[in-house]
Amino acid sequence: MILCAAGDIHGGLDRMYAGVLAFEAALGVRVDWVLHVGDFGVWPDPARVDGATRRHEGAGDFPTWFAERRAAPRPTVFIKGNHEDFVWLDAQPSSEVLPGLHYLRNGGVHELVVGEEVLRVGGVGGCFGPSNFGRRASTLQGYAKRHYTRDEIEALSEASNLAIVLTHGAPAGVRFDRHRRGEGFVSEAAGLDELLARTRPRVCFFGHDHTRVDAEIAGVPCVGLNKGHYPGCLVAFEMKLGERAWRVLGEWPPKPSSG
Ligand SMILES: [Fe+2]
């Protein structure tokens, strides 16, 4: 199946799907599933956005999409980032929050189905917070829900046969040449590295750091995605049932030429 991983969009749904469709046209393929690594910008009620979101992008397109019950133009699964309406997400009776748009809860597995093929995707969204990591997820309230917890990692570690793992933060050990926390910054997002060591997916995608980066943690290729509409915010790949090998088809949008 043809999959397209997408970085943080902070409510830019129209722009992301326009990018996916332009990318498809450039590649001459149709994407079966979009996999989003969090900070999707789920704010059904724009009055509830958090402070950082208010200062930066604002609520984005989600309120409009939600009011109109718009369908995702391509089946999409997303995990949470650290800027969403977590209380609303947790309260949803169905994982399909809009037609074709599926929320993958922390520690959960979503099965991507295309014809006879099924690929299993696990997810741990949110970011690392040392003070909340050891608490039980069920005890986190409100804004604290932006953090993932050890029990969520444990839950997903029991899952078998995961083809793909989505995390919001970079698993511990991923190094960034350039980073807002300094050159050569190494991620300290504890637990995500252990998760990869225990579940051994074919690939892990992450976002949050807004940088297109490649790494390998516990023998698992890790692909960091850029944000929004910047080069490397979308990576398309082909993966087949029962074959560990997979291949990248391309990245989008193209880097502007320096000439
Ligand atoms: Fe984030």
Image (cartoon, grey):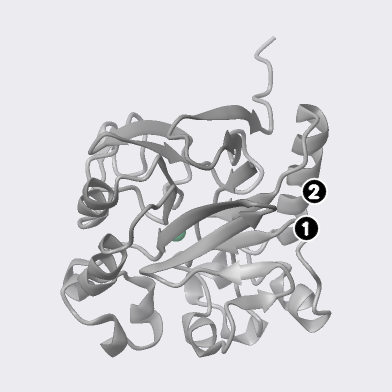
Per the image, the residue denoted by label 1 is 14
Left or right, 75 with reference to 222: right
Question: What residue is at 39 percent from the left and 66 percent from the top?
Answer: 126
- Count of numbered circles in the view: 2
Q: Position of residue 221 (x, y in %)?
A: 36, 34
Q: Is label 1's Cβ within 8 Å of ligand 1?
A: no
Q: Is label 2's Cβ within 8 Å of ligand 1?
A: no
Q: Amino acid at mark 1?
A: Asp
Q: Secondary structure at mark 2?
A: helix
Question: What residue is at 66 percent from the left and 44 percent from the top?
Answer: 229
Answer above or below: position of 135 versus 199.
below
Q: Position of residue 188 (x, y in %)?
A: 21, 50
Question: What residue is at 43 percent from the left and 38 percent from the top?
Answer: 223
Q: Secondary structure at mark 1?
A: helix
Left or right, 35 with reference to 144: right
Q: Quadrant of the N terminus?
A: top right
Q: Amino acid at mark 2?
A: Ala
Question: What residue is at 74 percent from the left and 45 percent from the top?
Answer: 20
Q: Residue 18: which numbered mark, if any? A: 2
Answer above or below: position of 7 versus 66.
above
Q: Are marks 1 and 2 in contact (CB under 8 Å)?
A: yes
| Residue in the foreground of this view, choosing between 152 and 84 | 152
Q: Quadrant of ligand 1?
A: bottom left
Q: Residue 93: which numbered mark, if any? A: none
Left or right, 154 with reference to 124: left
Answer above or below: position of 121 versus 98.
above
Q: Position of residue 47 (x, y in %)?
A: 63, 86
Q: Residues within 10 Å of mark 1 (few under 14, many from 20)?
A: some
